[in-house]
Image: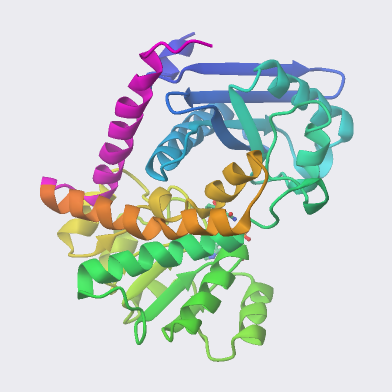
Amino acid sequence: MNVFGQTADSHEQIVFCADPDSGLRAIIAIYSTALGPALGGTRFYPFADEAAALADVLNLSRAMAYKAACAGLDLGGGKAVIIGDPKRDKNEALLRAYGRFVQSLGGRYYTACDVGTDVRDMDVIARESRFVTGRTLAYGGAGDSAVLTAFGVLQGMRAAAEHVWGAPELRGRRVGISGVGKVGKRLAGLLLAEQASVVVADPDAAALDAVRAQHPEAETATVDELPGLALDVFAPCALGGVLTDQLVQALQAQVVCGAANNQLAHAGIDKLLQDRGILYAPDYVVNAGGLIQVADEIGGFSEPRARARATQIFDTTRRVLALADEEGMPPGQAADKHADQRMREVGRLRSVWLPR
Ligand code: NAI
């Protein structure tokens, strides 16, 4: 057994939670609390085995710490997984048992929605814990986080456009959106309002129909043909790992900027994109709008305040792209460096003793 070896990434704390009567098997991972309590959603998923669940929660919690640090939030990074099929295994007792474990961490970890959990589940968990955000409107929640996520991606795309074409204008640019679910569909609407042209792809015909119904001017393509089209921007808004060696070779766009988490299939893709002259706007920098929204909810949600903060994704993306140029490194690496620096410099202030 080599449990600590798995956490070579230096996670602060990993909590295994079990409640056999309700069937709860969950893992909460806290990567860092250097900047504040760790915030990250709860993923309810039928993982193939415990090792897969552990690997996922370790990766996801680390990514949350970097996302929060880059977004300038006073939050650390954490994430949780519940092992099981949400359609079959989710019930009140299990969610409340999970809520008690979240509460037991005393605020070191705040939970929210992720794959397999929704705002109503957060209300159930909140019956056992104060450390829950991303709740229903009835309980002071902020609603669908896709709204500010799409808005933030647009800000990141404007900064990338400025970097490549000299002006933060998307008018007349052709943007291919791969995945038009909650975020991709909204992004299509925002881009069309900016007078960009939009090509959308999604394996789900209903998702495409929904875009066509709202925006008849949007073109459609298959998921496979989209990257090879003559696009200015490729916007991955579906699954992680989409930027593979093959896809990058096929890409015609000059910019990659989209909402999907963990877009790079492996770390070397960042450099491959750079070598091909394609500007990559790092995923966790541009997709922080949803995190900004749920973070704002903790203190009582203000839409104008959260939107103002999501607008700053333009400046953050700009800063990261400039840092990449200065240091001669790919943008993904520059984003990590920017986040690491903030965690170190601001996190260090905790060592300054203050009277209570
Ligand atoms: P969603 O589940 O509403 O939409 C995903 C869409 O992608 C669906 O329409 C699905 O049919 C489509 N899709 C599935 N496989 C595909 C493929 N191979 N190629 C193209 N499209 C495919 O998810 P949502 O909320 O729109 O999120 C999209 C991405 O953005 C995810 O990676 C998510 O983690 C990330 N994200 C979402 C945030 C949010 O607030 N919703 C916040 C930050 C990141």
Instruction: Judge from the rendering whether residue 179 lies leftward or rightward of residue 175; answer left or right.
Output: right
Place of residue 205 in the rendered image (x, y in percent of width and height, measured from the top left): 65, 76
Please, which residue is most extreme toward the bottom here?
Answer: 217
Residue at x 58% of width, y 30% of height: 53
Q: Was residue 281 drawn as part of the magenta stretch in this picture?
A: no
Q: Where 312 sits versus 195, above or below?
A: above
Instruction: Judge from the rendering whether residue 19 lies leftward or rightward of residue 168; answer left or right.
Output: right
Residue at x 29% of width, y 47% of height: 332
Please, which residue is most extreme toward the front here?
Answer: 355
Place of residue 169 in the rendered image (x, y in percent of width and height, measured from the top left): 32, 78
Q: In the rendered image, is residue 50 in sight?
A: no
Nearest the camera: 288 or 296? 296
Place of residue 150 in the rendered image (x, y in percent of width and height, measured from the top left): 52, 64
Question: For ligand 1, which image quadrant applies?
Answer: bottom right
Write the start and end of the magenta stretch as one range.
327-356
Nearest the camera: 83 or 63? 63
Nearest the camera: 323 or 113? 323
